[in-house]
Image (cartoon, rainbow, N blue to C red):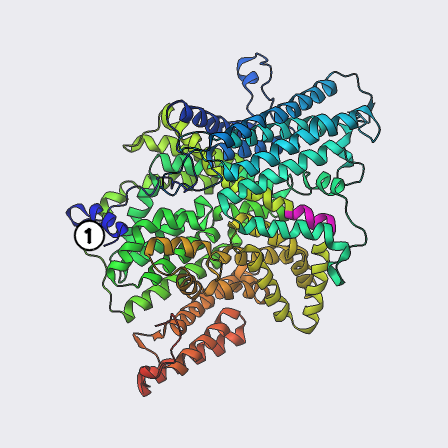
Amino acid sequence: MSDQDKKVDDDQVGGTVLAEGVDEEPIESNRRLFEGKGYLVIATLSTIYAAFHMIALNGVSISDWTGIEIPFLPQFPMETWNFRIVHIAGALALGFLLFSAHTFDGKAHKDTPWLSIIAAILLIPAGVAGFTAIGFMQTIASGELPQMGGLTTWAAFPGTEIYQTEIRWFGIPLLIATGGAIVTGWLERRGRERYAASDVVLAACAVVVAIYLVAIYGTAARNSVGTPFVPIGVAFAATAGAAMILELTRRVAGLALVVITGIFLLYTFTAHLLPGILAVQNAYSWQRFFGHVYSDAGILGPTTAVSSTYIILFIIFAAFLQASKVGDYFVNFAFAAAGRARGGPAKVAIFASGLMGMINGTSAGNVVATGSLTIPLMKRVGYQKKTSGAIEAAASTGGQIMPPIMGAGAFIMAEITGIPYQEIAIAAIIPAILYFASIYFMVDFEAAKLHMRGMREDELPKFRALAKQIYLFVPIIILIVALFLGYSVIRAGTLATVAAAVVSWLTPHRMGLRSILKAFELAGVMSIQIIAVCAAAGIIVGVISLTGVGARFSAVLLDLAGASNLLALIFAMGIAILLGMGMPTTAAYAVAASVVAPGLVSLFVENGMEQSTATLTAHFFVFYFAVVSAITPPVALASYAAAGISGANPMETSVASFKIGIAAFIVPFMFFYNSAILMEGSAFEIIRAGITATFGVFLLSSGVQGWFMGGRTAWFLRVGLIVAALFMIEGGLVSDVIGIGAAVGIFFIQKVIRPDPNATISVRGAD
């Protein structure tokens, strides 16, 4: 018996399965576990970092409260660029202190004191760069420099003293410290409970970069960003900053995004040598590119705009929910509501993972949170290992498309497109229903084929007792109501966070000052990964905006559409999935939206859509495929996480999860052919589209699983069901009639002629 199975046994005290520990934060294999003073330092920094965002986003100033001007404390609201620079710098500093460059595999490793000494020496060049940056800041603040257009000038041209100082006393020392610390970090070994010298140096370098950029971007020099005249110091700071972002991304999210970013960086400096649509006229200099990438056209652009506002706000909200143990309640509620159905644990996984996934914003993280309980139970009632993991992976991935929060996806889409959040959340309703209905049908038919039972009454939490705690949904209800009453996302999120703390007082897990501080600490830690990947995605966005490769890709898409719209959509789907493989949803969508969405918008407009409808449809198309990249072989993060819990082969699990989530690969095409699925059209059109598409995914699930109307189905009927499903999902009146007619005919053949189901063609993973 596996450790996971044993865990479930231990939880079944008196035969009742109770979810416990769902809200516990998983500990990554390379995270340091500090004790004593070391923990106090990191906990304090994490708490301050998260609380700073809550205060800044709500425009609250300590000086306003007290009437006393306190030196060195920022005044709110902060200037946008400065806020984003501090946002990234704080995540980098915390991330390097918390996450080691290597994993702790439980084996004893000797410390490397000589490497720690070398790394510590790197504090000297970091300090030199830091003192120089502070000197620049003081010079700019002195008022002695000339003004131009109301802004201080920064005459750092070749041959000037400032130019030489930026190179000798800021840029070169900063790159030595940053590069040296990254390399020594790969080799340095320190105990898991101790800080590594190289990581301390990197944290210091992140602060130095922020000090310099805040100082320089407050002058007229910001107007030269993206041109050959950008200050040389900005290029040095951006190079060091980009290197640190990629290194932290490697530590917290793996190599996939780093490799993709590296390919885009390589493209930038070789594009003038390439043929065809990839070519640019002139080569880009190092100074121009890196002076461009750390701006609002790149790292400080849309991805960081979202991570520094909506994403971190909802991470704080999720942390407050965790502190009040709402996650445990969600899972127990799901068990009480769905556990009795056949194959009950699989349906619990769908319910619970949908609730958890829309909040926590990461498919793989959701798999770990809920799958540790649901996957062993699915195995126990008869699901294969790979199927158990696949169901959890598909359900957890679906949480990213579940309104109202959509794992922060709705807010990213709103930021990029300018479409109001409310419209995006409403448009997501029918596609989310179709996705989860499809998964439900798939697991139900699998359970029927295997003659599974539901869980017994004495194995489940008491629904009546859980219903008395329905108030735990109040924070989410407040969030939804506030958003649709017209409150800003920030204000609605803040109200929901406060509500989570208030509601906790009705539970045994009351949130006092200590619990609130702990929630902020947890939020600070939880935010590191998503901030790092959003910043890394910003580098790619910067490459696309500088080189114009996105516009040229749009031209290719339109050329394909000249031959076939369907071919163009399939091509766009492939690019979106490819760019999203191995990446968290937010980064995958941000990158794919920059490359694919503009071409789709043009394609849809050419086919007669209004601009606003075309924008919404194109971005939903891209978003869905960025999401399902988490269950798309060969690189399926959510499926791999589930396989780690189920003990199945990761590739087999990813193939099975692809099959279970098959509707998500078909429905986006219907956005183009039937925009009523996105709530575009009359009430009758929308209702008809929702009903017929739901019937369509029922037929699709029947065809894929080989189970229709209470019995196994012959292979040719399965093919017919899939064809009928496609007609139903398409949504036109004629296609609906054809689909219904085909379904009725198949039902007649199934019940009257009764073809031999044993003639079924073997489809790998289907039976």
| Lateral position of residue 666 relative to residue 29, left or right | right
> Which residue is depicted at the point 60% across and 22% down?
74
Q: Is residue 305 visible?
A: no
Q: Amino acid at mark 1?
A: Glu
Residue furthest to the front: 114
* Residue 178 found in image quarter: top right
- Image quarter hosting the C terminus: bottom left
Residue range in magenta is 540-548
Along the line of sight, which residue is nearer the eye, 390 or 623?
390
> Which residue is depicted at the point 54% across and 48% down?
586
Q: Is residue 355 magenta?
A: no
Say few, some or many: other residues with alpha carbon within 10 Å of mark 1 (under 14 / 14 to 19 / 20 or more).
some
* Residue 532 found in image quarter: top right
| Lateral position of residue 758 relative to residue 140, left or right | left
Along the line of sight, which residue is nearer the eye, 664 or 84?
84
The kind of secondary structure the magenta stretch mainly shows is: helix
Along the line of sight, which residue is nearer the eye, 100 or 591?
100
Q: Is residue 547 magenta?
A: yes
* Residue 145 percent across, percent down from the top left: 80, 20
> Which residue is depicted at the point 49% across and 79% down?
738
Residue furthest to the right: 159
* Residue 161 percent across, percent down from the top left: 81, 24
| Lateral position of residue 391 relative to residue 449, left or right | right
Q: Mark 1 sits on what residue?
A: 459
